[in-house]
Amino acid sequence: MKVILKKDVQSLGEAGDVVEVKDGYARNYLLPNSMVEIATKGALENRERNIERIKAKAEKLHQEALDKAEKISAIEIISIEAKAGESGKLFGAVTTKKLADLLSEKVNFEVDRKNISLNKPINQVGNYEMLIKLSSKVSTKLAIEVKASEVIKESIIEEMDEQEAQAE
């Protein structure tokens, strides 16, 4: 039986593909789960019209992602200040949520924290790099500079920890 895939099916293909499947598989699994439609003459003509619309929409989204990547690349570097010890170790890490919020502020559009990946955790003062994935085909890199806003002496912290331990 010839069918047109409505959704991506791992063993068959991507949405919009015309594939040949066994009758029982189509009737008992694919059709009841709305994964396919039978490839009639009208359905094939409709598929052709839809493919053009889907391609146009995908092209528009791709262009928007390229524009966003250009805006992000124009920034070049993001500076973040955080409390740190004498050795440069931060009190807490700089998270992707914090980076996404800061970046969204600078570029005037929403950047999802899930689209940001770091090559290593940011828990020290220094320079880092993040990868921002804007679509499946468009991504850009951005440098991050982490500075100490306040250097706290580690000996003071150790003394406070000892006092708390003695108090218990």
Image (cartoon, rainbow, N blue to C red):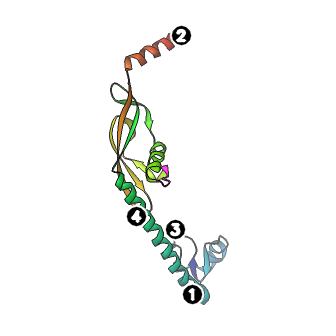
Nearest-to-viewer mark from 1 and 3:
1
Find residue 119 and report its horizontal and vertical position in percent. Answer: 36, 46
Classify mark 1: helix, strand or loop.
Answer: helix
Looking at the image, tell me whether mark 4 or mark 2 is earlier in sequence order: 4
Task: Examine the structure image and report whether residue 112 is included in the region drawn in magenta.
Answer: yes
Q: Image height check: is 89 above or below 113?
A: above
Q: Which quadrant of the view contains residue 90?
A: top left
Label 2's element?
helix
Quadrant housing the C terminus: top right
Could you tell me which residue is drawn at 62 percent across and 79 percent down? Answer: 37
Q: Which residues are magenta?
A: 108-113
| Residue 104 appearing in the image | yes
Lower position in the chain sequence, tag 4 or tag 1: 1
Q: Which residue is mark 1?
A: 45
Q: Nearer the viewer, mark 3 or mark 2?
A: 2
* Residue that mark 4 sits on: 66
Q: Which residue is mark 3?
A: 10
- x and y percentages locating residue 66 in the rendered image: 40, 64
Q: Which comes sooner in the sequence, label 3 or label 4?
A: 3
Give the residue pinned by disc 2: 167
